[in-house]
Structure formats: structure tokens, C-alpha cells
Image (cartoon, helix red, strand yellow):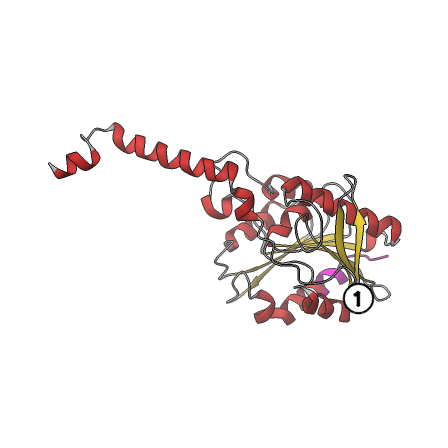
Amino acid sequence: MWTRLLVGKWSWWRPLQSLTFIYLCLLVVALFFSNKLIYQPPEPGYQVDDIGMHQITRANGEKVSLYYRAAAPDMPTLLWSHGNAEDIGYLNTRLTNFNNMGYGILAYDYPGYGHSEGKPTEDGCYEASAAVYDYLTTTLKVPSSQIILYGQSVGSGPTTWLATQRPCAGIVLVTPFMTAFRTVTKIPIFPGDQFKNINRIGKINVPLLVIHGDHDEVISQSHGKKIYELHSGPKTFIDIQGAGHNDIYILAMEEVLAALNDFQTSIKIN
């Protein structure tokens, strides 16, 4: 009696109705609140006049903040797209370590991150990545044959997209995903998904390095393995044992640098 009062009369339609209601609720979240879940910019971790920091203007007039350090002779420059909850100021120690190894660094902030203007969106991230690439090649005169596109986590999205739009020597993806929504749903069940790396990676022929921890609690390593599987060019997969999503550099910086060094020496940099 109490059950009937609380949930109504049982019918075979009731589970379907419940599932439909749940799906519609999740669909509303996916369509209207996904940006708040995907993009989580922290308080700016730097000032625009800090050493190494610059700003450029993209086509819509909004400023993009970037950090640049030149490469040592015969070393590539990494065009670095960062994760969703950090900005280039928070990466200072990591970027310095890479630069001390001889790598050039051009790291940038997405719209709404650090001191980059605008609001973070998928298209805004793409446009920012293209703007800094063009700045790197035209203003800083770094040839495309000396550029490695480097993207971590959500940064795998603009990095993979950029590799289909501009020439480069290679692409490095650290803890990448197949698509943004599939980090949660596993399978594509909602429209409006963002950063569809799974649809683009097969169109990229330059060498690929994927680095992914086997204890990643945010983006399952299965995502990185799928991206690796679908790539049609030369490729390497590095399985970082015991590493999760946010501690991969803490636990395995030497392993990451060794993998990157092996990768870049296998590419003809000129």
C-alpha cells in the first residue's frame, strides 16, 4: 500500500519512463552546463609582465597570454596546451625543467584562463591554439619542422585539432581522451560532445607519442590506448605504472623526459 502511494501503480512502462527522465536530466547538464565541468580556470598564477610572459591578439581582438622560451640549437619547440584546471603560471617549474633540457617552450592560456581574454569554449581553444602557432612560425620564425605539438588532458583537444590544421614535426598527448563526454559516459550517448579526438587522430600522419598512467582516475588509460590504436603514422605508447591523472610528472618526470627525448631524436628536426 505504502509503495503504491509513493511510486504509483507498477507497470512495465515505469522503468522506461524513469530511464527517460534520467537521460533527459543528464542531457540538460550536457547541453547547458558542460562548459562549467570541462573548463575550471583557477585564479591567475602569474602577471602579464612576468619574465617570459607575452600577449598576442587573435582574430576577434581578444588577448591570448603565452609563455615563451627559445630552444637550444638542434632542439624542437613544444607548443604546449595545458590541462583544464591550471594556467601557464602554475606550470612554471615544469616548463622550466623542459626548457633546461634544451626544449623550446611556447605555452598559452585558453580564453578565460590566466590573463587570456574571453570565455572558455571549444572553438575558442582551437582559435587560441592556431593564433599562437601562427605567432610561433611567423613572428618567432620557428619552422614547422621544429615544432612538436604537446597537449595534456583537455589540452589533447586543441592539440589534436591543431595537428589537422597546421604542419608539425610530431604530436605528444599526455593523458588524452577520446572525447570530453566519454570520460564520463564511456560511450557516445549525448549530442554536443566536445574535443572529438577519436574522429581526428586517424587523419594525422606525423609521429605520435602517447603517455598515460595506468591508475588514471579521471581519464581511463583505455582512452589513451584507443587514440594510439587509431593513429595511422609512426607511434609510441608509454604506460606509466602507478601514475594517476594529476601526479604523472611527480611520480615519473624522468620517465616522461626520457620518452620525449627518445621521441624527438627519432624525428628529423631541421
Q: Residue at x 63, y 70 (%)?
A: 253
**Is residue 146 left or right of 245 when viewed as pictured?**
right
Give the camera-side residue of 3 and 174: 3
Total numbered circles: 1
Residue at position x 50%, y 48% from top? 183
Q: Amino acid at mark 1?
A: Ile
Of residues 171 and 134, the one drawn nearer to the viewer in this rendering? 134
Q: Please provide the residue range marked out in magenta.
A: 261-270
Q: The N terminus is located in which quarter? A: top left
The residue at the point 15 percent across, 38 percent down is 3
Whether residue 204 is visible: no
Circle 1 packing at 10 Å, graded few (<14), some (14-19), many (20+), is few
Residue 70 lies, with reference to residue 182, above or below; the image says: below
Q: Is residue 26 left or right of residue 38?
A: left
Q: Position of residue 116 (x, y in %)?
A: 71, 51
The quarter of the picture where residue 91 lies is bottom right
**For residue 253, side relative to residue 205 (left or right):** left
Say which residue label 1 marks: 51
Vertical side of 25 occupied by 153: above or below? below
Instruction: Judge by depth and name the residue closer to the eye, 24 or 260.
Output: 24
Q: Position of residue 221 (x, y in %)?
A: 52, 55
